[in-house]
Image (cartoon, helix red, strand yellow):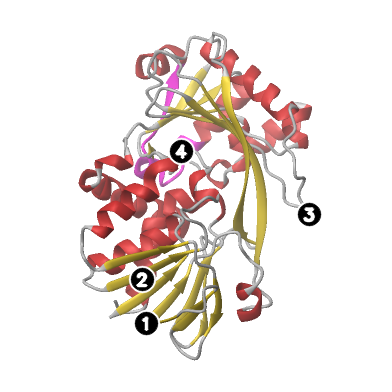
Amino acid sequence: MRVIVVGAGVLGTMHAWHAVERGHEVLHIEREAEARGASVRNFGQIWVSGRAGGAELDTALRARELWEGIGARVPELGFRAIGSLTVVKNAAERAVAEAATRRPDAAARGYELLSADEAREINPALRGEFAGALWCERDGAVEPRSAQRALKAALLESGRYTYLGGREVREVVGERAVRDDHGDTHHGDAVILCTGAWLGGLVRELIPDLPVRRVRLQMMQTDPLGEPLTTSVADADSFRYYPAYRSDALDALNAGQAQAPTAAAHKMQLLMVQRADGGLTIGDTHEYEAPFAFDTVEEPYEHLTGVVESILGRPLPRIRHRWAGVYAQCTDTTRVVHRQRARDGVWLVTGPGGRGMTCSPAIAETTANDLGW
C-alpha cells in the first residue's frame, strides 16, 4: 500500500512512522522545507500528569510507551524519562496536589506528594522556597526542534519513505490523489492530512464546518543553566489549566487565591524543561480569540522569569530566544483529536491542541489500526 501523508509536524511524521513500520510505502509532503509550526515550538514534554482520566490518559500513557520505544531506536530524539515536579507554595496548593494523589488513576500516572526536601533530592536545582511538589513519574521529554528531522532520517533508511518539502498540497484529485503547487499529482491508496494549525485553503474546502480552533502561545528559551534540571517543572497555575486536577480542593484554591494579574490575563501556567544543550524552555500563555496579535508582549516573560527564579532560588540565565506559536485544538476540549474522512480514502487528523507532542504516536497508531494498515 502507498500512503500519502500531508504535513511533516509530529502528528504527520508519526503517521508516516506507523505506515512504514507496517511495511507500507510513504510519500510525505510538507509545504515548508521542514516543519516550522507548533511541533518545533513546544516544550518537547511527554506530559502524562495533567491529562483527563479515561481516553485522554489512556492515549497519553500509550504514547509515552511508544515514545520510549522509538527513542531507543532513534537516540537523536533525545528521549528522557525524567518525570515532573509541580511545585506548591502553600497549604491550599498542596491540598490540590494531595487530592490528585487520591485519584483512582494516580498510580498509573506515578503520582506522589513530596516534601520540599524530597523534591530537592530528585531535582537539586530547586533551591527556592516552596512547600512541596507533586511528582509524576511517567512524564518524559524529547527535543522538539530536532525530533522531526531525526525521525525523518530514520524513515529514509527504510527505503520505503520519500520526503517532498516545499510543496503545498492545493487539491484532492478524485479519490486518494493530491495535486501540489508545482502542478504534480501524487496517487496513493490512502491520504492522511495532518495540516496542524493550517485550517484554511484546502482544509476549509474539504470540511467547511471543522470543529477545530487555533490557539496562540508565547514561550522562551535561555542560555545553559550550568547545572542539570533533572525533571520537568510546573507551578500550581497548571492545576487551573489541566483537567486531572479538578477537585473540591481546586475549587477552594480558585475561590481563595487569585492568580497573579498577568497570569490571569494571559491564561498562563509555568512549564519548564531543560534542553540537551542545558538551556531552559519556559512558558506559556494561551490566546483563544483570533485574530491574534502579530507581536510578542513582555509582561508574560517578566512574570515567568519571576516564578522560575523563586523556584530555582537563583537568577535565570540570559534569555536567548522568544517566540510565538499557534496550534489547532478541538473546540470540544474533551476530545483528544479530530479524525474525519474528508473523501473516500482521504482523512484529516488534526486538533490535538497542547496534547500534540505527547499523544501523536498513539493518535497515529489509532489511525493506522482504524484504517486497517
Query: In this view of the protein, which residue sits in the foreground, 54 or 61?
Result: 61
Tell me how far mark 1 sits from mark 4, CA to CA: 49 Å
Q: Which mark is residue 27?
A: 2
Classed neighbour count for the residue bearing mark 4: other residues with Cα under 10 Å, few (<14), some (14–19), many (≥20): few
Classed neighbour count for the residue bearing mark 2: other residues with Cα under 10 Å, few (<14), some (14–19), many (≥20): some
Task: Mark 1 or mark 4: name the one nearer the start of the chain.
Answer: 4
Q: Is residue 258 visible?
A: no
Q: Which of marks 3 and 1 is in front?
A: 1
Tell me how far mark 2 sits from mark 3, CA to CA: 34 Å
> Looking at the image, which residue is at 73% across and 37% down?
266
Range of the magenta residues?
100-115
Q: Which of marks 3 and 4 is in front?
A: 3
Residue 25 drawn above or below residue 345: above
Q: Position of residue 130 (x, y in %)?
A: 55, 14
Quadrant containing the C terminus in the rendered view: bottom left
Indicate the amino acid at tag 2: Leu
Image quarter for residue 161? bottom left
Query: Mark 1 = which residue?
Result: 188
Task: Mark 3 or mark 1: name the one nearer the start of the chain.
Answer: 1
Q: Do the residues labelled 1 and 2 touch (CB within 8 Å)?
A: yes
Quadrant containing the N terminus in the rendered view: bottom left
Task: Mark 1 or mark 2: name the one nearer the start of the chain.
Answer: 2
Say whether residue 54 is magenta.
no
> Looking at the image, which residue is at 71% across and 39% down?
267
Task: Mark 3 or mark 4: name the one nearer the start of the chain.
Answer: 4
Task: Mark 2 or mark 3: name the one nearer the start of the chain.
Answer: 2
Q: Which of marks 1 and 4 is in front?
A: 1
Q: Which mark is residue 102?
A: 4
Query: Mark 3 = which residue?
Result: 291
Tell me how far mark 1 sits from mark 2, CA to CA: 8 Å
